[in-house]
Image (cartoon, rainbow, N blue to C red):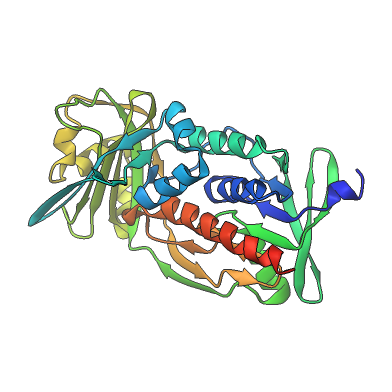
Amino acid sequence: MSELAKHFDVIIVGARVAGSAAAILLARDGRRVLLVDKDAFPSDRLSTHIVLGGGANVLERMGVIEMLERAGGVRFSKMRTIGPDFNYGGELVREGADDRGLCLGRVLMDAAMIDAARSFDGVCFRERFRLLDLLIEDDAVVGIRGEDASGMHEFRAPLTIGADGMRSAVAELASARMDAFKRVDVPCARAYYYAYFEGVSREHLGDEVVTEFESAPGAGNLVCRCENGLTVAATAFDAREMQSFRTDLASNLRRYLNRSFEVGKMLEGATMAGKVFSSGLLNNTYRDPVADGALLLGDAGLHVDPLFGQGHSMALISAWIAGELAREWFASGG
């Protein structure tokens, strides 16, 4: 490998929503980007599936929203929130504004976003690449060291981005070696389970995302149409109930959804397609997102309780902000 091939303007660790979005935005500005991920694609990732209006607007500005629709993404044009004494709904398309969201599973979404990033000549993508260490000189991150099937490699760049999720290796290595990315954790009070359903009637559920709060103490539910005619439905409940819930995942998921205000009725006559997924017990995590020569995007810098469905949108918005700031940073000489 030539010395030139080992040097980039930006290295991005983590190629899913935040990382691939940042690669697209930086490459669009003419930057040479190395995008690496420990996984192979297409592959699944536990997720709420929901991109709210702010994130969908970023996808629109990036020019990829129609591609994600072709991949199967469902645009929801209404949001409804239900609680013990309220039932609020709102249209997301109105005169002069289109704030429709998007619902798409991670297998299809991540693969499509990576394909979009790889369409730029300035993006070099390496999957199944395991980050082993950061290159640090004069208390600044100057690159990465890692390995893949072809052996051990070192790559250098003036900017390294960690977009590798709530268990970010970039953040952990920088914390251990240069006391960077200070972290605060607050445990989530809820556990989360979801599954896909077939045969949800249009009379029961249109192109909308429905969220419920307090159908039981501390509980929440979500339902939305997604790709291939499927509907994703999720339930959240007191984390102390998790062990008993796991004794019969399918039956308990149905039971918890049926105790909802309206979600259970929306799923009447539908059948569960495939297995039940769980995110396990999570933390609300905040890391100071900036270090010398490095920054964190998406869940690597901020992971919030999935009940609020903000993960995708915040990842995309943080990538957009990083792209804008990087343009100024490179123009100023770093």
Q: Nearer the viewer, residue 232 or 109?
A: 109
Image point (48%, 63%), residue name: 302
Q: Is residue 277 left or right of residue 308?
A: right
- Judged left or right of residue 87, residue 100 is right
**Quadrant of the rendered structure where residue 139 is?**
bottom right
Q: Residue at x 72, y 38 (%)?
A: 121
Which residue is the extreme one toward the right? 2
Q: Please provide percent x and percent y for residue 102.
A: 37, 40
Asked whether residue 52 is in view, the answer is: no
Residue 34 lies, in percent from the top left, at: 73, 48
Q: Identify the residue at horizontal 77%, vertical 59% (top origin).
A: 157
Does 281 sit left or right of 239 as displayed?
right
Between residues 217 and 261, which one lies in front from this camera angle? 261
Query: From the viewer's perspective, is 88 left or right of 165?
Result: left
Quadrant showing the N terminus: top right
Q: Nearer the viewer, residue 184 or 228?
A: 228
Q: In which quarter of the image is the C terminus?
A: bottom right
Q: Residue furthest front?
A: 96
**136 vs 147: above or below:** below
Spot occupied by residue 69 in the image (x, y as percentages of width and height) = 42, 31
User: Relative to 66, does residue 95 appear above or below in the rendering?
Assistant: below
Residue 195 lies, in percent from the top left, at: 34, 36
Residue 84 in view here: yes
Give the farthest residue toward the left: 85
